Amino acid sequence: MKIKNATSKGYKEAHDGDSINLSRPDSKTRRGRVGFQIANTLDTGGGNTMGVLQYGKIRKLTPKECMRLMGVEDSITDKLIEAGISDTQLYRAAGDAVVVPVIEVIARKMIGIWESENAVQEADN
């Protein structure tokens, strides 16, 4: 499927499983609207702006799918839904969030570097 894009061809070719960024569909300057077998960045603008190409059609992601991309467990999302949190608010929450598993990996790497540097300094003393 051809997705309108600000490339020289004017589109990017998307295939089943590719993510599609549906925000600002009339923009003449946006690039990167197709995520080739990956999820594009979630954002808070305009409600649900992420979709996936499935069976040749664009299907918008559900709030639960967006929360999963951010590393939120289904049980937490289910509690938010049961509490009456609207889909719009769930999409915003996913777009405002950081991906906790990614932050955890970065923090562990930073701690490892810090511990290595401290070990070297202690050995020099």
Image (spheres, rainbow, N blue to C red):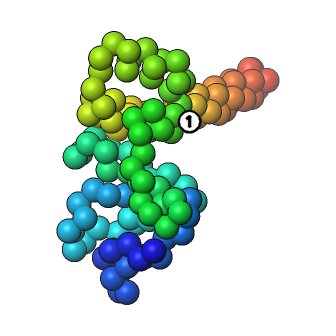
On the image, the x and y values in percent for residue 15 come to: 54, 69
Q: Is residue 91 left or right of residue 28?
A: right
Q: Name the residue: 32% across, 50% down.
A: 49
Residue type at the position of mark 1: Val
Q: Name the residue: 37% across, 87% down.
A: 9
User: Is 68 located above or below residue 14 in the figure?
Assistant: above
User: Is 30 located above or below residue 22 in the figure?
Assistant: below
Q: In which image quadrant can residue 27 be found? A: bottom left
User: Is 77 located above or below residue 91 in the figure?
Assistant: above
Looking at the rendered image, the quarter that the C terminus falls into is: top right
Looking at the rendered image, the quarter that the N terminus falls into is: bottom left
Q: Name the residue: 33% across, 36% down.
A: 91
On the image, the x and y values in percent for residue 100 come to: 52, 29
Q: Secondary structure at mark 1?
A: helix
State the residue position of label 1: 102
Q: Is residue 5 left or right of residue 102?
A: left
Q: In which image quadrant can residue 61 be found? A: top left
Q: Name the residue: 43% across, 14% down.
A: 79
Q: Residues within 10 Å of mark 1 (few under 14, many from 20)?
A: few
Judging depth in this view, the residue of 79 and 69 nearest the camera is 79
Furthest-bottom residue in this view: 9
Judging depth in this view, the residue of 100 and 55 nearest the camera is 55
Whether residue 96 is visible to the viewer of this picture, yes or no, is no
Judging depth in this view, the residue of 54 and 7 nearest the camera is 54
Whether residue 72 is visible to the viewer of this picture, yes or no, is yes
